[in-house]
Image: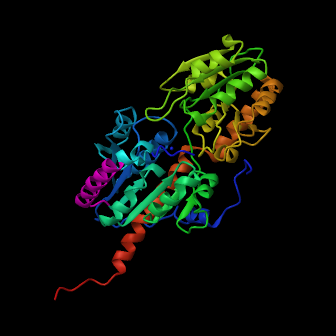
């Protein structure tokens, strides 16, 4: 995995000790009448509206809706202003753009370290002056803020792990994570990649997404299956695997590709790949960036998630489920905790062109429709945003009340 040092079975795993933390925090004592509002800071690494950004939006929406919390979001100044900031303001958060020590690959090079140190110093000073009760580091790329927050005497720091950690990243990120008082991972796969699966501070809270439409509709009638893929055009997202498999299967239907190259880092020339690999290019439509993929999902029979490396979770899989569409995904970690092979979708080995080609060649619209119905049932049972939001809010409330209870129990110092 590459953190932009900028993101089993399909049935829910048996509860682990860490999962019990989330259940225990669901019921928290009410805030005492007259006590001040808790000050929560959410630090995020981008201003886009992809997977991790949408989860941040859900977290902030839940916290900002409470009358006992005051929520501020810090977004970095090294990326262009995007759609997330205005949406966060609509949900009731104070949004500020500020230099942040976000762990991006370019910043880790020798020439970028000075800037990282400078931004860290500025962040520490701002934290010390604002007196937040809790800091939420929204992605692993934000974890450099955790020790700075503790240095600024913030009592509670939560690390939200939304991306798998590579072997090369794990040591450094583990050191930063020591400053967190709680850790939340979006999947067991992500937690295990961090090496923190036995840490008492850690728990898994699966992502959840809202259904974009009031009703689940069937795709338009067509003889051959229609598929859609929606992701950034990063090298690890598997577009080369997808298009090679599509061509090997004889281009059996229609494939729509949404997304675009990343704002920072290396991108993939998807239109160029289509021209170079697909012998029947008329079966592939490259749409590019869209504000909302739901219209294209409704037109498709299934969604494809062909990631070549570990995937933290795969929000697009839940979006598909919420609209009654099955998912074809690589065995890339997070999606394996969502998709049940042969029931709500199909799984293939990462980078396995032949395996994906066999799936394309063997599936028909009736099979996809039946799996889509079961996928929607799974979404309603396990992956609604309300379920996720309650559990994540419980982490925040548990942290805040825990520290207040501890503070109340401490003896009051008497001036000499």
Image quarter hosting the C terminus: bottom left
Residue situated furthest bottom in the rendering: 416
- Residue situated in front as seen by the camera: 404 or 183: 183
Q: Is residue 115 magenta?
A: yes
Q: Is residue 101 visible?
A: yes
Residue 394 in the figure: left or right of residue 11: left
Residue 196: give x, y in percent of width and height.
Answer: 57, 63
Q: Is residue 98 magenta?
A: no
Residue situated furthest right in the rendering: 362
Q: Quadrant of residue 371?
A: top right
- Above or below, 196 against 166 in this view is below
Q: Quadrant of residue 243?
A: top right
Q: Quadrant of residue 88?
A: top left
- Above or below, 261 against 406 in this view is above
The residue stretch that appears in magenta: 113-132
Q: Residue at x 43, y 55 (%)?
A: 143
Q: Main secondary structure of the magenta part?
A: helix
- Above or below, 176 against 271 in this view is below
Residue 319 in the figure: left or right of residue 358: left
Residue 127: give x, y in percent of width and height.
Answer: 28, 57
- Residue situated in front as seen by the camera: 249 or 72: 249
Marks counted in the figure total 0
Residue 58: give x, y in percent of width and height.
Answer: 47, 44
Q: Is residue 33 visible?
A: no
Residue 377: give x, y in percent of width and height.
Answer: 70, 40
């Amino acid at each position: 995995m590459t953190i932009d040092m900028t993101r089993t079975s399909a049935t829910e795993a048996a509860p682990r000790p860490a999962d019990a933390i989330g259940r225990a925090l669901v019921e928290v004592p009410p805030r005492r009448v007259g006590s001040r509002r808790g000050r929560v800071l959410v630090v995020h690494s981008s201003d886009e509206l992809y997977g991790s950004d949408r989860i941040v939006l859900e977290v902030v929406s839940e916290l900002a809706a409470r009358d006992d919390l005051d929520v501020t979001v810090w977004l970095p100044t090294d990326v262009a202003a995007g759609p997330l900031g205005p949406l966060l303001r609509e949900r009731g958060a104070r949004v500020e753009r500020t230099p942040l020590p976000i762990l991006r690959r370019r910043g880790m090079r020798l020439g970028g370290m000075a800037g990282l140190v400078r931004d860290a110093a500025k962040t520490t000073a701002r934290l010390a002056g604002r007196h937040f009760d809790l800091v939420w580091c929204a992605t692993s790329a934000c974890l450099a803020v955790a020790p700075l927050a503790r240095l600024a005497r913030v009592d509670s720091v939560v690390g939200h792990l939304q991306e798998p950690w590579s072997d090369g990243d794990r040591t450094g990120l583990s050191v930063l994570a020591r400053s967190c008082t709680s850790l939340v991972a979006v999947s067991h796969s992500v937690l295990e990649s961090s090496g923190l699966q036995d840490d008492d501070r850690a728990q898994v809270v699966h992502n959840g997404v809202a259904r974009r439409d009031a009703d689940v509709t069937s795709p338009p009638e067509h003889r051959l299956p229609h598929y859609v893929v929606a992701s950034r055009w990063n090298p690890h997202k598997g577009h080369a695997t997808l298009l090679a498999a599509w061509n090997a299967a004889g281009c059996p239907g229609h494939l729509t590709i949404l997304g675009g190259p990343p704002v920072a880092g290396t991108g993939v020339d998807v239109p160029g790949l289509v021209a170079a690999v697909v012998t029947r290019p008329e079966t592939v439509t490259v749409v590019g960036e869209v504000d909302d993929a739901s219209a294209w999902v409704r037109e498709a029979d299934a969604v494809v998630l062909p990631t070549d490396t570990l995937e933290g979770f795969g929000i697009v899989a839940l979006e598909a489920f919420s609209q009654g569409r099955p998912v074809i995904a690589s065995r890339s970690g997070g999606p394996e905790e969502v998709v049940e092979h042969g029931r709500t979708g199909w799984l293939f080995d990462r980078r396995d062109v032949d395996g994906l080609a066999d799936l394309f060649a063997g599936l028909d619209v009736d099979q996809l429709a039946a799996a889509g119905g079961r996928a929607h049932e799974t979404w309603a049972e396990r992956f609604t945003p309300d379920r996720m939001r309650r559990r994540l809010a419980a982490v925040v409330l548990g942290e805040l009340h825990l520290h207040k209870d501890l503070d109340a129990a401490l003896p009051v110092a008497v001036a000499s």
